[in-house]
Image (cartoon, grey):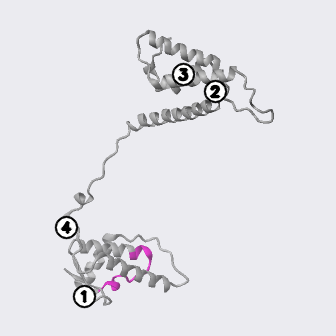
Amino acid sequence: MDFKINDFEGPLDLLLHLIKESKMDIMNIEIEVIADQYMNFLKEQEKMNLEVSSEYLVLASELLEIKSKLLIPNNKVEEAEEEVDPREDLINRLLEYEAYKNITKVLQEKELLRKDIYTKYPENINNYIPENKEIHSDVSLDDLIQAFQKYYQRKLDNKPLNTKVTLKEISVSSRRSDIKRVLKKKGKVSFFELFPVSSREYIVATFLAILEMAKNRELTITQNDTFDDIICEVA
């Protein structure tokens, strides 16, 4: 036999190998045959001056004990009582070991696949944010969003039943130009005055234009008190 003790992960691994090599059903192990094969394997290892660990010897003694129980009839068992198969515990351990071994193979395959995948570690997003991105205003972005949501909800509540569909595209840049003209003419206006049209596209484009202009310091946004009107004026 070409196999050595260190070719197996333990005595159950060796026993499972012998069962498969003999093409036996693991649920119906021929203990007499397997025990002899197991003992012959250990003797071959000793002949080659290979050290056999104690765990292999423990399983060898267990196999011999099961073999002896099967060979010697037990007359003490009552007729009405079902005799317990002395191989049952060993079979259960072999089935459990085989299941773990199969799972290990799957995990090893996944580990090999994972080696071909490269993961980029997370970085600090602040490294990619330019320093001049803050809104030039004493009103926070949350304040503007809340004001925008309240305004938009009011527009939805007041929306007429019959609406006209338009295909005209409203861009952020065009709204910036419109807002600049209004501010140039009036100097300062209410935040809500900059939304003369109630269509969703118009409102969103206007809101984004205001944020972009505040970021670029083209206008300032102020509010004297919490519930006061929000004022936009030329920076």
Which disc, if any, is residue 60?
A: 3
Labels 3 & 1 near each other (Cβ < 8 A): no
SS state under label 4: helix
Q: Quadrant of residue 35?
A: top right
Circle nearer the N terminus (3, 1): 3
Choose the circle earlier in sequence order: 4 or 3: 3
The CA distance from mark 3 to mark 1 is 100 Å
Under mark 3, the amino acid is Ala
Give the alpha-carbon distance from disc 3 to disc 2, as whole Å.
18 Å
Q: Position of residue 105 (x, y in %)?
A: 49, 32
User: What residue is at 45 percent from the left and 12 percent from the top?
Assistant: 46
Q: Nearer the viewer, mark 3 or mark 2?
A: 3
At mark 3, the secondary structure is: helix
Q: Looking at the picture, does residue 11 appear above or below residue 166? A: above
Residue 109, x across and y down, in percent: 46, 33
Q: Label 4 neighbourhood size at 10 Å, few (<14), some (14-19), many (20+)?
A: few
Q: What's drawn in magenta, residue-wise? A: 190-203
Q: Which residue: 41% across, 14% down?
A: 50
Q: Is residue 72 magenta?
A: no
Of circles 3 and 1, the one toward us is 3
Label 1 belongs to which residue?
186
For the C terminus, give its image quadrant. bottom left
- Indicate left or right for 155 with 191 as reference: right
State the CA–CA distance, disc 4 to disc 3: 77 Å
